[in-house]
Image (tube, grey):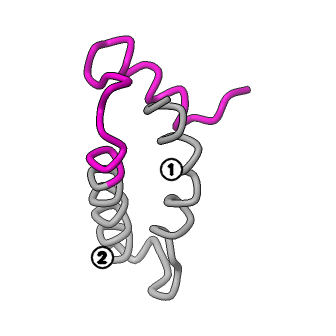
Amino acid sequence: MEEPLVVLIARCQADGVITRSSSAEVLSETLSDLIDGVAERLRNESILREDADLPALFRRRWEALLAYATA
């Protein structure tokens, strides 16, 4: 079974939302902003512990995703 994030990027590419020529930097910044927003919202809703480093967990997953998307 493929990683969900790889599947998401593949579907976005198939839909023409992103292209393989999309800059890794742009993808990285966009995904980082998204992760930070999700983490903040989860903390505000008391779903995520204050000391949990959700952005770091997700960012480790982005490395493989960005390599695939920009190959």
Secondary structure found at label 1: helix
Query: To which residue does mark 2 refer?
Result: 44
Q: Is residue 34 above or below residue 67?
A: below
Residue at the location (56% across, 65% down)? 57
Query: To which residue does mark 1 refer?
Result: 62
Residue at the location (32% across, 66% down)? 36
Q: Is residue 21 above or below residue 44?
A: above
Calculate the distance from the C-alpha at mark 2 to the C-alpha at mark 1: 24 Å
Residue type at tag 1: Trp
Residue type at tag 2: Asn
Secondary structure found at label 2: helix
Left or right, 16 with respect to 49, comes to left
Image x and y of residue 1, in percent: 73, 26
Of all residues, the one furthest to the bottom in this rendering is 51
Image x and y of residue 45, in percent: 33, 72
Viewer-side label of 2, 1:
1
- State the image quarter where residue 34 is shown: bottom left
Find the magenta span and give its range.
1-28
Q: How many numbered markers are drawn?
A: 2
Q: Earlier in the sequence, mark 2 or mark 1?
A: 2
Q: Are marks 2 and 1 in contact (CB under 8 Å)?
A: no
Q: Is residue 16 above or below residue 36?
A: above
Image x and y of residue 69, in percent: 45, 31
**Is 50 or 67 nearer to us in this picture?**
67
> Does residue 69 belong to the magenta stretch?
no
Of all residues, the one furthest to the right in this rendering is 1
> Does residue 17 belong to the magenta stretch?
yes
